[in-house]
Amino acid sequence: MRKEKGFTIIESIIYIFLTTIILFEGISMVSVIYKGYIENESISINYNDMQSFYINLDSILKEEDIEDVEVGDGYLLISRNMDSTLKSKKIIKDKDCVVVKYLCGNYEVGTNVLLLKVSDFKVVNKENLIYIIVTDKNGEDFIRCL
């Protein structure tokens, strides 16, 4: 009588085959999860940028001494009267970003970027409401009533 010591070739081949299938499935799952993570990270960054834009816009609108708000199709002009000098902030789309231009009289004294990667920026006035519509590079609209 012979004693069996070890595995047969068929058992080893079956083990290698099953281990390979499990390994490939695991790698496939990790790949799908990683792709989902990258997509969600991009969306999250986009929403964070948009929230920061609206927070900055709110701080501009809550400043004291606002005398007038003028609305155009692609701009929002906020005028203040300080030290007997008319100072204004004009929020417009410039190239692929939304900027605020600081004006003193008819002269531009500075520019600050509020939001990058913008394909369209509209300001719509309906009765007593002002809507800001920002379209990002992905074509998604972000609408906010001021």
Image (cartoon, helix red, strand yellow):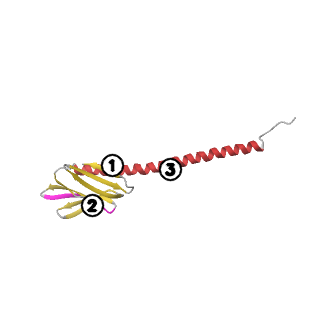
Kindly identify the residue that appears in the image at 48 percent across and 48 percent down.
Answer: 36
Of marks 1 and 2, the one in the foreground: 1
Q: Measured along the vertical axis of the image, is residue 79 above or below residue 7?
A: below
Q: Residues within 10 Å of mark 3 (few under 14, many from 20)?
A: few
Tag 1 near tag 2, CB within 8 Å: no
Left/right of residue 34 with respect to residue 61 in the rendered view: right
Q: What is the residue that sits farthest to the left in this orientation?
A: 84
| Residue 35 image label | 3
Kindly identify the residue that appears in the image at 38 percent across and 57 percent down.
Answer: 137
Q: Is residue 104 magenta?
A: no
Q: How crowded is mark 1: few (under 14 residues within 10 Å), some or many (20 or more)?
A: few
Quarter of the figure with residue 101: bottom left
Q: What stretch is highlighted in magenta?
A: 85-95
**Residue indicated by mark 2:** 111
Kindly identify the residue that appears in the image at 20 percent across and 65 percent down.
Answer: 107
Kindly identify the residue that appears in the image at 29 percent across and 53 percent down.
Answer: 133
Of marks 2 and 3, the one in the foreground: 3
Q: What element carries label 2?
A: strand
What is the three-letter code of the residue carrying label 3?
A: Lys
| Mark-to-mark CA distance, 2 and 3 | 38 Å
Q: Is mark 1 on a helix, strand or loop?
A: helix
Q: What is the residue that sits farthest to the front in this orientation?
A: 126
Which is nearer the N-term, disc 1 or disc 3? 3
What is the three-letter code of the residue carrying label 2?
A: Thr
Residue 106 in the image: state x and y as whole percent.
Answer: 18, 64
Tag 1 near tag 3, CB within 8 Å: no
Residue 89 in the image: state x and y as whole percent.
Answer: 22, 57
Tag 2 near tag 3, CB within 8 Å: no
**Residue indicated by mark 1:** 51
Left/right of residue 71 with respect to residue 115 in the rendered view: left
Q: Is mark 3 on a helix, strand or loop?
A: helix
